[in-house]
Image: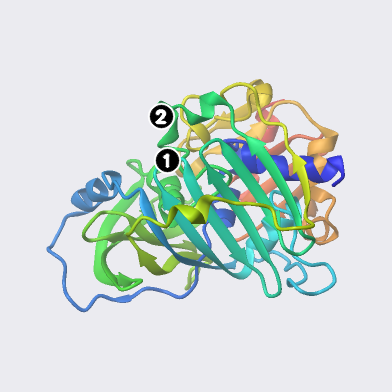
Amino acid sequence: MHGDGARRRRPWLRWLPAAAAPVVIAAASLAGSLPAGASNPLPAKTPAQVLELAAGHQVRAFSGTVEQSADLGLPELPAAGKPAGPASPGSVASVIELLSGKHSARVFMDGQDNARIQVMDQLAERDVVRHGSDVWFYSSKDNTAEHATLPAHVQDPAQSKERQGGGGVHTPADVAQQFLSRIDPTTAVSVGPDVSVAGRAAYNLLIEPRTDGTLVGRVAIAVDGENGMPLSVQVTARGAGKPAFVSQFTSLSLEAPDASVFAFTPPPGSTVKELPVPDRPHGPSGAHTPGAMHGDAKGNVSVTGTGWETVVGTLHGSASAAGSLLQDPLLSQAAVAVPGGRLLSTALLNVLITDDGRIFAGMVPAERLQSAAAAAR
C-alpha cells in the first residue's frame, strides 16, 4: 500500500484535536430509528440524578449493533459496492461518507484494551480491532490490512478510561460525553418520558442550549435506567423539527464478548502494512479535553469561546492541511466562498478554511468562525 494511504489512516491512531471532536461525534458511533416509549415506567429521577447516573456508569463489557442516521446537508459519496467503493478509514472521504445517510456496525468491548468495530457496507466490511497493544485496520473491499503497536503511554491505566475505545472506536456513550461536557449555566436540562432502546428502559435526558451562539437546538440522550450507560443520542439543529443526527443501539448484550472476537489475523492473500505511531502522549485526557491534540501540533491551536460556543482553530496556516479537506471533489463543491476563505456548512457544524490555510471549526454560526479567525491573526 502506498505511503499516502497510510497517512490518511493514521488519524485513527491519534487522539483527535478538539477541532475534530464534532466529526468524531458524527463519524464514530453508528445508529438509526428513534427510541420507542418504555412500557414499564422507571423510578422518577430529577435531571441532576439522571446526569449523575450517566456520569457514574461502569459498563465496560458489551456487544451490540449500532446504527447511525445522519442528515447534515453534506453531499453523499457513492455507496459501497459502486465503483468508488467504501472509503479508507480516517480519510476525508470516509468522514463525509459516515456523516451522510445510514450506516450500521457491530461493536464489541471488553475492558479498557479490547475493542472491535465492524462497519457493514453493502458489499464490503471494514474492521478496526484493538487487542492489548495491537491495533488492526482491515478492508475487505481491497483485502488490505494495516497494523500498529501502541506505545506504553497509551496503555497507561490512568489514561485508558477516556480511551477505552482505542483505534477510533466510539460508542453512543462516547458521543453522549461530548455533549454532556458542554453543559453549563446556559444549558437547560430536563427529563422527558421514558424511552426503550434495544429492549432496555431508559431515561430521556433532554439538553437544550439557551444561547443563539450555537447551531445545536436540542440533544436527547437515552440513559439506561439500570446502569446509566447512554444507549442513544439524537441531535436536532436549532429551528429544525427532526434530528439531524441519530446514533443508537438496536441490539445490546451486557455479557463479555468471546475473547476470539479480538484475535484478528489478516486473511490469506491480504496486503499488510505496519504503521508508525506517535512516540509521546498527546495530553492528559485525550480527545475529550478541549485543546488536546497530537503532540507535534499542540502549539498551533487557538481555542475561543466556551461550552456550546467553543471555536477551535489553527494559529498558523498549512496549505497541506487545508488542501486535504478540499481534495475530495464532492467536499470541495460543498465548500462555498466567503470573505476570507471557504466555508463548509452543515446543520450542526461549520468549518472555515481561510485563504492563508488556517482551519476553524465549531458548532456555531459561520460569522463566529470568521470573527475567531480575524482575532487569531
x%, y% of residue 257? 41, 57
Q: Position of residue 298 (x, y in %)?
A: 63, 24
- Quadrant (top left, top right, bottom left, bottom right) of the C terminus: top right
Compared to residue 352, the image places residue 84 above or below, namely below
**Taking 123 as reference, is 29 left or right?**
left
Give the labeled residue for mark 2: 157
Above or below, 298 relative to 347: above
- Mark 1 is surrounded, within 10 Å at the Cα level, by few (under 14), some (14 to 19) or many (20 or more) other residues, namely many
Q: Nearer the viewer, residue 307 or 33?
A: 33
C-beta proximity under 8 Å, tags 2 and 1: yes
Would you place residue 1 above or below residue 318 in this image? below
Give the distance between the C-alpha atoms of the residues marked 2 and 1, in whole angstroms: 8 Å
| Among numbered discs 2 and 1, the one appearing first in the sequence | 1
Q: Does 10 sit left or right of 263 as displayed? A: right
Q: Residue beneath label 1, please?
A: 112
The residue at the point 37 percent across, 66 percent down is 252
Is disc 2 surrounded by few (<14), some (14 to 19) or many (20+) residues within 10 Å? Answer: few
Residue ranking furthest to the front: 268
User: Residue at the spot x=83%, y=67% of the render?
Assistant: 84
Residue 27, image quadrant: bottom right
Q: How is the image coloured?
A: rainbow
Identity of the residue drawn at 43% across and 37% down: 162
Q: Secondary structure at mark 1?
A: loop
Q: At x 70% / y 69%, what residue is drawn?
A: 124
Q: Is residue 126 above or below residue 82?
A: above
Numbered badge on residue 246: none
